[in-house]
Image: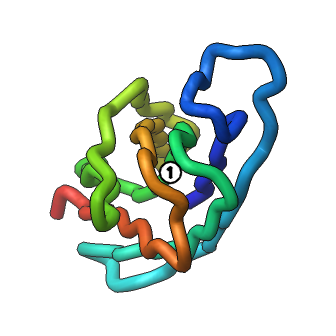
Amino acid sequence: MVVVVLGNGVGNVHAAGLSLDGAASNTCTGSFSSVTCSVTLTTSNSNDIIIAIANGQCTENGITLGTPTGSGLSFTLRNSGNHLSGIATFTVGEWWALATLVLSSETITITESNGI
């Protein structure tokens, strides 16, 4: 999972001067049927847009990516899709959330489940 934070620290994310306020990533592994992945994120400003991107791969029956969770954050799906390459199916999802407060060691978690 990759988390990117965009903001300008003044509460108006559409204003000029957007900048990167934080980032986190993690490569996660788990059992064949389920993988839970978490990152820890700290920001300097309030009113940041948090973008979470996750992907998964399996060889049969497809993958379901759960909606990311984080204390005080409400993620909305922006886009998702599947791609078949040979015998593997790749799934990617992108979500966003508004962080109205500065984040301090905020844990963001997503679960991937295999359709077995």
Which residue shows up at 42% across the image and 25% down it? Answer: 79
Q: Is residue 6 visible?
A: yes
Give the residue furthest to the left.
116
- The 10 Å Cα crowd at callout 1, few under 14, some 14 to 19, many 20 or more, is some
Which residue shows up at 62% across the image and 15% down it? Answer: 14
**Residue 31 in the image, given as x and y percentages of width and height:** 34, 84
**Residue 23 in the image, given as x and y percentages of width and height:** 70, 59
Q: Nearer the viewer, residue 13 or 32?
A: 13
Q: On the rendered structure, is 74 left or right of 22? A: left
Q: Nearer the viewer, residue 12 or 41?
A: 12
Which residue shows up at 64% across the image and 52% down it? Answer: 45
Seen in the picture, residue 88 relative to 92 is either above or below; the reply is: below
Give amino acid for label 1. Asn
Q: Is residue 111 visible?
A: no
**Residue 12 in the image, given as x and y percentages of width and height:** 58, 23
Quarter holding the C terminus is bottom left
Q: On the rendered structure, is 60 left or right of 25? A: left
Disc 1 marks which residue? 55
Seen in the picture, residue 34 relative to 68 is either above or below; the reply is: below
Quarter holding the N terminus is bottom right
Which residue shows up at 55% across the image and 31% down it? Answer: 11
**Residue 10 in the image, given as x and y percentages of width and height:** 64, 33
**Image quarter for residue 81?**
top left
Seen in the picture, residue 90 relative to 26 is either above or below; the reply is: above
**Image quarter for residue 30?**
bottom left
The kind of secondary structure element at disc 1 is strand
